[in-house]
């Protein structure tokens, strides 16, 4: 019984739950050459059950995505939809509303059903509408990822999966964790 209470306290202390929900995203795609390419991504992303609307900006190869209110977001599904359409993600920024969310370097924060590791902003408090950029592999260019991944020495940055070091945040090794920057 003491062990269970201790584990619960470690979980509560090391893992911060945030009252926030993402409302929209900005997606930058690579490999587009024409309006048909843009249309393929638009259709693929619109099929996702948590997406309310998608607006394409053909000139800039970007897409504005609005999420359904209260729906569970699946960030990897967005990337998969773009890749299934034959293209790559060059950038993904998420917009959400935050309420007194204090960032601590190398500490995981739960937003919805997902865990986020902020690589910057240590000591900063997020309030109101904020934009965060997903910086995991295959969400940014290789060159950007190499530079960004130097922000933390934790091995999860390289894999996007929790490691033993993440156990203090109440995560089991192998759980998905997104790496983001403000």
Image (cartoon, rainbow, N blue to C red):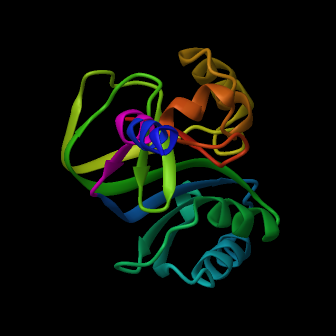
Q: Is residue 117 magenta?
A: no
Does 1 sit above or below residue 27? above
Query: Residue 136 appears in which quarter of the rendering?
Result: top right
Quarter of the image with the C terminus is top left
* 106 vs 40, nearest the viewer: 106
Q: Position of residue 121 (x, y in %)?
A: 33, 25
Query: Residue 144 appears in which quarter of the rendering?
Result: top right
Say which residue appears at 51% left-offset and 79% top-offset: 50
Say which residue appears at 44% left-offset and 60% top-offset: 25
* 9 vs 136, nearest the viewer: 9
Q: Position of residue 83 (x, y in %)?
A: 78, 62
Range drawn in magenta: 10-19
Query: Residue 24 appears in which quarter of the rendering?
Result: bottom left
Does 26 sit above or below residue 85? above
Q: Residue furthest front?
A: 1
Tell me if 182 is positioned left or right of 178 in this view: left
Say which residue appears at 58% left-offset and 23% top-offset: 148
Does 89 sit above or below residue 24? above
Does 146 sit above or below residue 56? above
* 113 vs 135, nearest the viewer: 113
Say which residue appears at 41% left-offset and 22% top-offset: 105
């Amino acid at each position: 019984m003491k062990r269970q209470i201790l584990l619960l306290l470690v979980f509560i202390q090391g893992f911060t739950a945030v009252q926030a929900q993402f409302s929209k995203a900005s997606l930058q795609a690579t490999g587009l050459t024409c309006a048909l390419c843009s249309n393929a991504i638009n259709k693929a992303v619109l099929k996702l059950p948590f997406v309310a609307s998608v607006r394409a900006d053909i000139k800039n190869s970007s897409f504005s995505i609005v999420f359904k209110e209260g729906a569970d977001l699946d960030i990897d599904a967005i990337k998969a939809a773009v890749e299934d359409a034959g293209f790559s993600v060059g950038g993904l920024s998420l917009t959400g509303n935050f309420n007194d969310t204090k960032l601590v370097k190398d500490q995981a924060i739960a937003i919805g059903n997902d865990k986020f590791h902020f690589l910057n902003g240590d000591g900063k408090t997020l309030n109101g509408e904020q934009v965060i950029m997903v910086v995991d592999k295959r969400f940014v260019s290789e060159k950007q990822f190499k530079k960004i991944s130097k922000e933390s020495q934790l091995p999860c940055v390289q894999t996007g999966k929790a490691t033993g070091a993440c156990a203090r945040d109440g995560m089991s090794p192998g759980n998905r964790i997104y790496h983001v920057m403000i």
